[in-house]
Structure formats: C-alpha cells, structure tokens
Amino acid sequence: MELTHIEHIGIATPNIEEAIPYYENVLGLKCYNIEVVEDQKVRTAFFKIGQTKLELLEPTSPESTIAKFIEKNGGRGGVHHIAFATPSVQASLEDAAAKGVALIDKAPRGGAEGLNIAFLHPKSTCGVLTEICENPNLK
Ligand code: CO
C-alpha cells in the first residue's frame, strides 16, 4: 500500500463547541471548517497542524457509531481513528484485501472535505480503526 502521510487523526467528542476552546486557546490551532457528514451521522470540526489535520467528530444521532464510542469511553470521547493519505484508495483497498485485511468499506466513499475514504477493520489493524483517504483535488 502506498501511503504519503498522516492525513488526519479522528477524535470523538460529545460536543464540538465545548472542545474547540481547548484546541484553539491551549494548543493554539484554528478551527477552519465545521461540516456535517450525513452519511456517518457526525458533525466534524477541522484543525490543521503541518500537513496533518485533527478531525473532531460529534454524533448527530444516538445511532451514530461515534455516539456508541463515546458511551463506551465514559461519555468523554477520545482518539477514534487514524487516517492515512494515499494517492489511490481503490488501489490501497485491493492491496489490503489481497493481504487478508478485513475491510469495513469494500469501495471508496465520500467523506468530509471532499475526500474519498475507506475504513479498514480494527480486527486486522492491531486494534486501531484505520482510514485511508485520497484527495481527488490533487489529481
Ligand atoms: Co476521518
């Protein structure tokens, strides 16, 4: 699989507005985008540090996997997934599948910020929920 850098780290939070002051006032980062991703039942807030982003994820429904993750983490949230950038999500998925990795997404789908994304199953990734993503605007 060809990966170029860590695209973002996904962090679950019960409330984006309550989390933003920590990232802005303590870490000195700037929230530059807030976006709802209906497909994943989340509202996201983005910060950039170098070429890597932090993606805060707030559930928009109790059915959201993020809501369940927060519940399991004592209501506070925490690090949820790590996302790697790749020139091709499709090629990366094929490569991972050929190596016996369990896939959550068998094909790329649309994610926040116009990226094409797919998730690998944590049972095949040493327990870390892993996202791979490609920026179609770079092509
Ligand atoms: Co993500």
Image (cartoon, rainbow, N blue to C red):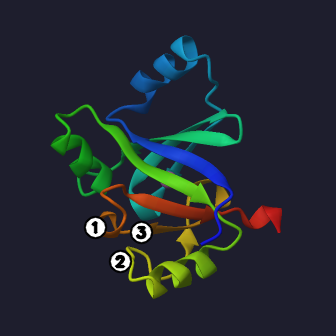
Residue at the far right in the pictured view: 139
Which one is earlier in the sequence, the residue at label 3 or at label 2? 2
**C-alpha distance separating marks 3 and 2:** 6 Å
Instruction: Tell me if the residue at label 2 has its CB under 8 Å from ligand 1.
Output: no
Q: Is residue 15 left or right of residue 26?
A: left
Do residues under tags 3 and 2 come within 8 Å of each other at their CB atoms? yes
**Amino acid, disc 2:** Ala
Q: Secondary structure at mark 3?
A: strand
Contact, mark 1 vs mark 2 (Cβ under 8 Å): yes
Q: Does 3 sit above or below residue 21?
A: below
In the shown orientation, is residue 120 left or right of residue 23?
A: left
Q: In x, y percent, where is residue 5?
A: 65, 52
> Which residue position holds label 3?
120
Q: Nearer the viewer, residue 53 or 6?
A: 6
Q: Which residue is mark 1?
A: 123
On-image quarter of the C terminus: bottom right
Q: Where is the N terminus found, in terms of image quarters?
A: bottom right
Which element is circle 2 on?
A: loop
Q: CA distance from mark 1 to mark 2?
A: 7 Å
Q: Type of residue at label 3?
A: Leu
Residue in the picture at 31% in, 35% down? 14
Left/right of residue 18 with respect to residue 8 in the rendered view? left
* Category of crowding for the residue at label 1, using alpha-carbon neighbours closer than 10 angstroms: few (below 14), some (14–19), many (at least 20): few
Residue 86 % position (x, y): 66, 65
| Residue at the spot 47% in from the left edge and 51% down from the top edge | 82
Vertical comparison of 69 with 31: above or below: below
Earlier residue among tags 1 and 2: 2
